Image (cartoon, rainbow, N blue to C red):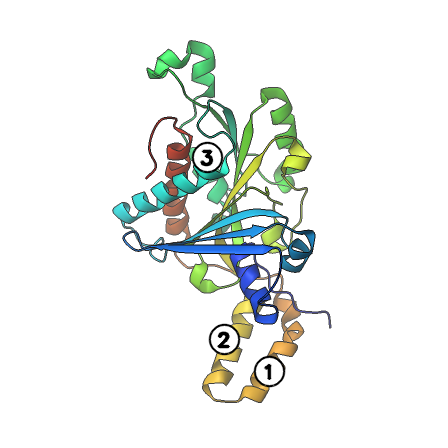
Amino acid sequence: MGNFQVRTDLALEARESISEADSELRGVDVDEYYLEEEDIRVTKVVIDTKNAARAMGKPMGVYVTMEAPAMVEPDDDYHKEISGCLAQELRQMIPDSDKEQSILVVGLGNREVTADALGPQVVDNLFITRHVVKAYGKAAYNKESMNLISSIEPGVMAKTGMETAEIVKGVIEETKPDVVVVIDALAARSTKRLNRTIQITNTGIQPGSGVGNHRNALTRESLGVPVIAIGVPTVVDAATIVGDALEKLLSEEGDFDKVKYMGHHRAAFSELNNMYMTGKDIDAVIKRVSYTVSEGINMALELGDSCA
């Protein structure tokens, strides 16, 4: 059997898995802090060498992970704090964020598949300004400076017959944005991070990578402009859940020989690799989280306002 590969889109989880084998991995810098009042843990992972990128299975760049344990709860005040933190981190990630820019927001995913509908639903709640400013000027919003925000929901290849990268590249050639912000649903390694984590990275994204459905990447190299990706893990692959449950059961029984055996023979679960699990309330969670993410983006892209 082939080797069992735990699938995750989170650089934080990739770093954790590497730590077990090589705690002194060079080329990876990790900085972590906890916002006690907001109950949000922020971890910044910087991959700055090719060897580290190869070991991590992630492109070189900066990955900021926000872990908010109560993000699935309908607490409006808590979600406002998450949006504010997201805005602050996103603003730091966008080049020249204090200057006027044209920014294209891309909502990836399939609107008809709830766990994959994060991108389209985020786009629904964005404050779009490009068309109004181009028609009437910034005076229409009674502001002297503001970003030109546009968005697109490219859909999926099964509906369009086109690669997402082809569609986005065509839009970029016509509208010439300075920055592209991409939103997509991700896959997590741990169920504890499901719908409770937001990752922001300046490395772009490969649509469908979380479920093994690789498409052309949306990166600065492929699109010609900086690409910031925002993702929330909404699924965990079934093989990981089964393997973790069995290992935990055996550990509790004290049968450590079998636990060790399990760790070396997870390829036995390869038939589950195409199955993905999500929460039973995913429809309500996606609606809530997508609004939280869109508010964070709106705050980050509004010039002159504080995100603190």
Question: What's the residue at 43%, 42% (across, down)?
Answer: 89
Q: Which mark is residue 245?
A: 2
- Mark 3 or mark 1, which is nearer the start of the sequence? 3
Q: CA distance from mark 1 to mark 3?
A: 46 Å
Q: Which mark is residue 123?
A: 3
Mark whose residue sits in front, 1 or 3: 1
Which image quadrant: the N terminus?
bottom right
Q: Which residue is mark 1?
A: 260
Q: Is residue 242 left or right of residue 267?
A: left
* Of 102 and 70, the residue lying toward us: 102
Quadrant in which residue 124 is drawn = top left
Question: What's the residue at 65%, 54% (across, down)?
Answer: 53
What element does badge 2 sit on?
helix
Q: CA distance from mark 1 to mark 2?
A: 14 Å
Residue type indicated by callout 2:
Ala
Q: CA distance from mark 2 to mark 3?
A: 37 Å
* Of 158 and 300, the residue lying toward us: 300
- Mark 2 or mark 1, which is nearer the start of the sequence? 2
Dots 2, 3 in contact, CB < 8 A: no
Q: Residues within 10 Å of mark 3 (few under 14, many from 20)?
A: many
Question: What's the residue at 41%, 21% (across, down)?
Answer: 146
What element does badge 3 sit on?
helix
- Mark 3 or mark 2, which is nearer the start of the sequence? 3
